[in-house]
Image (cartoon, helix red, strand yellow):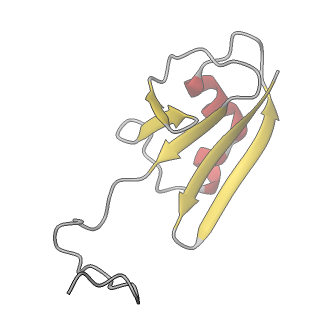
Amino acid sequence: MQIGVAYSEPAQQLWLRIEVPEDATVQAAIDQSGILRKFSGIDIATCSVGIFGKVAQLDAVLKPGDRVEIYRAITADPATVPRRVIAGDDDD
């Protein structure tokens, strides 16, 4: 069956379509995709993963057409990042 594997960094994004066995897991798809060799900074033991935006376990079984996503850690605390003011959206 065909599935996708996606990962994104600020300067580079990668989305691979690969063929996996019918009983493939998230972990198997990530391993088979080769994405861990392309992005040496991914530590799958500490990263969250998901399927179509919903967090999943590495042993979750995939369905045809699923998109496996590898999530990076948040690098900026939203509470400390100044809000951008959008023109015309002032509440003053």
- Residue visible at 63% across and 24% down in the picture: 28
Q: Total marks drawn?
A: 0
Picture quarter containing residue 19?
top right
Image spot of residue 44 (x, y percent): 45, 39
Q: Is residue 83 left or right of residue 68?
A: left
Residue 65 coordinates in the image, percent (x, y): 76, 28
* Residue at the extreme front: 92
Q: Is 33 in front, or is 66? A: 66
Q: Residue at (56%, 26%) from the top-left corner?
A: 27
| x and y percentages locating residue 6 in the rendered image | 63, 47
User: Is residue 39 shown left or right of residue 4?
Assistant: left
Residue closest to the far left: 80
Name which quarter of the figure residue 45 lies in. top left
Rendered view: 9 above or below 56:
below
Is residue 44 depicted above or below 85 in this figure? Answer: above
Where is residue 85 drawn, in percent x and y? 32, 85
Does residue 69 appear to the left or right of 43 in the view shown?
right
What residue lies at 66% left-to-right and 40% top-to-bottom? 5
Locate the C terminus and report the quarter of the image it occupies.
bottom left
Dividing the image into 4 quarters, which one contains the N terminus? top right
Q: Is residue 7 left or right of residue 18?
A: left
Q: Is residue 91 above or below residue 30?
A: below
Residue at the location (64% across, 55% down)?
Answer: 38
